[in-house]
Image (tube, rainbow, N blue to C red):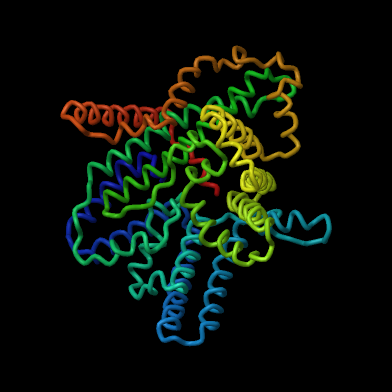
Amino acid sequence: MSLASIPFIFLFFPFFLLLYYVIPLGWWRKVVLVIGSLFFIIWLDPNHVHVFALLILINYLFGLVISRMKRERQDSKSAWVMTFLGIVINLGFLIYYKYSSLILTSLSPIIRIENPFFTNPIIPPLGISFLTFNAVSYLVDVYQQIVPGEKNLLSFSCFLLMFPKLTLGPVTRYDQIKDTLSTKWFQNPKFIKGLRRFVIGLGKKLILADNLAIIVNKVFDADYSTMNTSVAWFGLLAFTLQIFYDFSGYTDMAIGIGIMIGYQFPENFNSPYMAKSISDFWRRWHMTLTNWFRTYLFLPLELKLKNAGAFRQPVSIIIVFIATGIWHGASWNFLIWGAYYGILLAIEAIGFGKILKRIPVFFQHLITMLFVIIGWVFFKITNIASWSKFLSVLVGLNHPSGEITLRSMNILLFVPLLIIGALFTTSVTSKFYNESTLAGKIILALSIFGIFIISISYLLANGFQPFLYAKF
């Protein structure tokens, strides 16, 4: 049951909203939200309910202990040790479930390991990457006295388990929603605004991303050695758009649900493909993850490396983006993808960024997008040995007029989809949120209704396709 599935849209969510709105008390809504989130988890991942319960209890207790130590002005070192221990436990869960198989597989040629994971691979709990990052940010913020330790277990459970953001984020800090969690009486949310945001996200996923996936699957499953250069670029551009609409579509749905139930989640995208530099791209793409790494890893590294001189910032950036790559998945291609961006950002930081700003804006954008699009090769193709083959096709070194062409793959009819997709990566999408005149409101309402009907039609015809970021 995903946010973009028939059971969720027509069964779970309407029934959840009915219970949620029936009583205006804040505590009632938290009860419904926790029960609804637990039901959501049990539906999707019944084998890991105990993991969620453990993580909630561990972080709740650690938060209380750390908060008490800081409040009573006990030895600051003890509070630091408790915070560090809490972080280690959270990351231990993440490493065990997400990376242990990769680590043991990588070590097996060096150390002979009899390991049951080869025959019975560990399946990570639903949204473990997002949940542990939320928990780590909470413990650090309690230690730094940005927020007090939450005494209400129900409120804390809402923070970690909240189903709209559980599987794919956005990464949310406790202080961003604590005021709503502590409200005794529920304030009516901007329901229509939230519904509209949800439908736009649904359309991004089902109308754009899932149709772009048809191109992507055909191209990247084909034989690169006989592929036409135009086919490779067509497929890569399709993936560039697909991953944006797939992930930002989920974010829109999550934020829309949040608005409907009275919570304002942080934004995660801001027209990233309009960026004028790589650093600008990462200020616009997956913004909550970027902000998390900046706050909880980059700034502490900068402090630790304060005596490193000119190497401090580049080294910190590269470390942070290697970690960002590793966060995305237990595969070497993600680590290299992160290092790729770390190196590009380090080059910008040591001076190229200033040079880039001196050239015309059009070329800033063009250079940035070229590096971003090439970067998706390392992200999409998990088999590192295939990178050179695909890149050779892109630059025309490997049979530029190969046997596999746009016509032979029957994907030329998707050209309008690519044009529409490219158009809506610009700020033109903001017009969906503007309501200045009565005519504008009517057109907007009809557009939203049309998007919903078309989305449901696609869903009924093709079934649900998993979100790309669901595996991260």
Q: Position of residue 472 (x, y in %)?
A: 55, 49
Residue 426 in sight in this render:
yes
**Left or right of 396 in this view: 75:** left
Question: Residue drawn 71% across and 57% down?
Answer: 103
Q: On the picture, is 54 further left or further right than 374?
A: left
Left/right placement of residue 232 relative to residue 12 reads right
Please count the marks in the image: 0
Could you say where residue 411 lies in the image, as x and y percent from the top left?
55, 17
For this orientation, the residue located farthest to the front is: 358
Location of residue 333 in the rendering, given as x and y in whole percent from the top left corner: 68, 44
In x, y percent, where is residue 128? 52, 57
Residue 401 against residue 36 in the figure, above or below? above
Q: Quadrant of residue 448?
A: top left
Q: Does residue 54 show up?
A: no
- On screen, residue 425 above or below 331: above
Name which residue lies at 76% across and 21% down.
398
Q: Residue at the location (54% across, 67% down)? A: 90
Q: Quick one: 313 or 85, which is closer to the camera? A: 313
Compared with 32, 351 (above or below) is above
